[in-house]
Image (tube, rainbow, N blue to C red):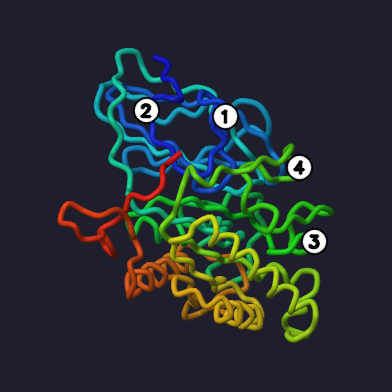
Amino acid sequence: MKVSLGDARLSYMGRIDRKDREKPEFIFPATSLSFCFWGKKAELTIENRRACWDNYVGAIVDGRQKKYKLNDWGETHLVFMEEEEERNHQVLFFKRQDSCHEIILKSLELSEGSVLLKPPERPVRRMEVYGDSVSAGEVSEAVEYAGRPDPEHKGEYSNSWYSYGWIAARKLEAEIHCIAQGGIPLLNGNGWVEPPVYPGMESVWDKVHYHPGLGEPSDWDFSCYVPHVVIVAVGQNDSNPDDYMKTDPEGLRAEYWRYRYRCWIQEIRRKYPHAVILLTTTIMKHSREWDEAIEKVCRELGDERIFHFRYTQNGCGTPGHIRIPEAEQMAGELADYINRLEILVWEGKTGEDGMEEGRGRGGTTGRDV
């Protein structure tokens, strides 16, 4: 039994290319498809486009997490479950990694006689994260290396389900768009992404497709998703190849970086006039001067809904990537900080009692993809 990938009973989350409703394209980590059905079997066929690493996708099937290795190019058939008896099933399929690859959903097949059910109600709270490998959940599953440099790997340890942003979103009962790419800086020409191009977040943040090795870039329609909270965790990769913020924090390059960072935050504000914006980095080791530069920009902006947030181990927590326990700690601190803000965070429409819905009650601004 073939299911249309444009069926209203399928629930999508993330910044997705849906020009062809029957062939959605997943680019960013934590992008997902979820559905419920009565039946015996569910199988999804996807096409992979690889840029680097080995590529894996994940799924939560009836509460159990699964992992699937993809063919580098072409189609891979994913069997979520195959049972003898019909019963209710719930599936959440998601992209584990960043734009080291892109995938196209080609077909969803259920066993004959299955019934596609209405999905669970989606959250009314919405978050968005702009970040690098830590925000993408890169190498998060290498838990035996917590607090240590990364092991040798080919992408098998990366899992956006355990990214601090998605964990925090689950704690806050919020939907999330995770605009994260490993190695990305703010400014073009720095960082670690796709040499010799080295794109920065300044040329990626408003895109759907953006990886220079995977085709032409395409713009995102910001009216499709309006977050209540935006996490901006960018800056620490600008230290490659030269950590100029540490060596000359008042020099011309440092001043230019602060200027470009301020301009970018102002662009985000223009897209989302009412969002709470949290400026931050992560606990992965980096020079404290980057956080001091962000603090200075935050003060200069003078926006009562823009805050500079630092974790208890900000910049000094680990020389490697953030493992699951560290991501859980970060997510807890982040969620607690948002919950303690003395402003309307989850701001939305006026409720039936005539009071504006505020913190802890959700909102309904914007429209979803």
Cβ–Cβ below 8 Å for labels 3 and 1? Answer: no
Residue type marked 4: Gly
From the viewer's perspective, tell me whether residue 369 is left or right of residue 114: right
Which sits earlier in the primary sequence, circle 2 or circle 4?
2
Rounded to the nearest angstrom, the CA distance separating label 1 from label 4 is 21 Å
Q: Earlier in the sequence, mark 1 or mark 2?
A: 2
Q: What SS does tag 4 mark? A: loop
Image point 26% across, 22% down: which residue?
A: 86
Q: Can you identify the residue that label 4 sits on?
A: 213
Drawn side of residue 264 relative to residue 61, left or right: right
Q: Where residue 260 appears, x then y in whole percent?
A: 70, 68
| Image height of 16 relative to 1, above or below | below
Under mark 3, the amino acid is: Gly
Marks 1 and 2, how far apart in space? 16 Å
10 Å crowding of disc 2: few (<14), some (14-19), many (20+) = few
- Circle 1 Cα neighbour tier, 10 Å, few/some/many (<14 / 14–19 / ≥20): few
Where is 141 relative to 81, above or below?
below
The location of residue 74, given as percent across then percent down, is 66, 26
Under mark 1, the amino acid is Lys
Sequence-earlier tag: 3 or 1:
1
Question: What residue do we see at 63% from left, 69% from top?
Answer: 149
Query: Of the residues tagged 3 and 4, which is closer to the observer?
Result: 3
**According to the image, label 2 marks what residue?**
8
Q: Quadrant of residue 354?
A: bottom left
Closest to the observer, 303 or 166? 303
User: Closer to the camera, 178 or 365?
Assistant: 365
Residue beneath disc 3: 189
Kindly report the distance in space between the C-alpha atoms of the residues bearing marks 3 and 2: 42 Å
Q: How far apart are marks 3 and 4 (CA)?
A: 16 Å
Q: Is mark 1 on a helix, strand or loop?
A: loop
What amino acid type is highlighted by mark number 2? Ala
Mark on residue 19?
1
